[in-house]
Image (cartoon, grey):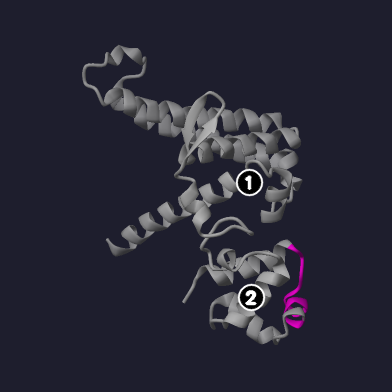
């Protein structure tokens, strides 16, 4: 049974503020049956899948979780692997996805004029870059460890602690700032940030696949 379909059709309905009763009537099924579809109790047929895609103006691939973009196709995630040109520096698809996702976040913060949250987000991302750069730098044992002022054995733990602190401050800033009233949906992301939306949505999908893989490993241990 496809586990993405129930989650996505429920999300789409709630994002559009459509009641389950209304959606069921529009789609020509009983509310009880739609409820079963949304809960994953029953699988729908092809006709309902196509009708639902037309109703929410998304692709069938999106409803089935095969792509991250509402109107995308399963091949678009693979296209992220292709090399693309960004200014004078060539970036791979994955690199562009990360860069564009950060740009979308900063554009969103700027749109909502949330400087306090932006400060904490910048701090968190800077620490993430710092942490991974230490990994790259330390790969060659001949590189002078005095490049960093924090001793290697303690650096990673301290960096993680600093990142958690920045994350906590970011959460507080988000709850107390302008973002608390920001309504974010799949449609709003695509409409407000069309140049970056694809990267963010595909990035989220890929990250959740990695997180789910780790979760399955933990369940099997």
Q: Name the residue under label 2.
A: 50
Left or right, residue 45 beside residue 146:
right
Q: Position of residue 86 (x, y in %)?
A: 55, 30
Secondary structure, magenta segment, majority class: helix
- Position of 109 compared to 141: left or right? right
Q: Give the range drawn in magenta.
A: 16-25
Q: Is residue 89 a member of the stretch shown in magenta? A: no
Judge the density around disc 2: few (<14), some (14-19), many (≥20) Cα neighbours within 10 Å.
some
Callout 2 secondary element: helix
Say if 105 sits above or below 51 in the image: above
Image x and y of residue 73, in percent:
56, 59
**What residue would you read off at disc 1?**
197
Residue drawn at 42 percent across, 34 percent down: 160
Q: Residue at image x 34%, y 13%?
A: 147
Residue 135 seen by the camera: yes
Q: Nearer the viewer, residue 59 or 216?
A: 59
Labels 2, 1: front one: 2
| Image coordinates for residue 209, horizontal then vertical, percent | 44, 55
- Label located before the other in sequence (2 or 1): 2
Query: Alpha-carbon distance for marks 2 and 1?
Result: 24 Å
Image height of 65 relative to 205, above or below: below
Instruction: Farthest residue to the left: give it.
Output: 141
Q: Does the magenta stretch include residue 19?
A: yes
Q: Quadrant of residue 10?
A: bottom right
Helix, strand or loop for disc 1: helix
């Amino acid at each position: 049974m496809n586990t993405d379909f129930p989650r996505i059709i429920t999300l789409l309905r709630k994002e559009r503020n459509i009641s389950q009763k209304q959606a069921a009537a529009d789609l020509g099924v009983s509310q009880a049956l739609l409820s079963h579809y949304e809960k994953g109790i029953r699988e729908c047929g092809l006709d309902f899948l196509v009708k639902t895609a037309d109703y929410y103006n998304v692709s069938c691939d999106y409803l089935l979780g095969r792509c991250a973009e509402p109107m995308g196709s399963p091949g678009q995630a693979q296209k992220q692997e292709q090399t693309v040109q960004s200014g004078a520096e060539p970036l791979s698809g994955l690199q562009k996805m990360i860069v564009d996702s950060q740009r979308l976040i900063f554009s969103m913060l700027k749109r909502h004029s949330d400087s306090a949250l932006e400060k904490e987000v910048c701090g968190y991302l800077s620490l993430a870059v710092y942490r991974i750069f230490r990994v790259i730098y330390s790969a060659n044992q001949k590189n002078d460890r005095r490049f960093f002022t924090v001793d290697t054995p303690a650096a990673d733990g301290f960096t993680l602690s600093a990142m958690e602190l920045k994350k906590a401050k970011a959460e507080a800033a988000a709850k107390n700032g302008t973002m608390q009233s920001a309504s974010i949906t799949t449609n709003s992301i695509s409409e407000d940030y069309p140049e970056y939306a694809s990267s963010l949505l595909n990035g989220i999908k890929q990250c959740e696949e990695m997180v789910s893989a780790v979760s399955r490993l933990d369940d099997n241990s």
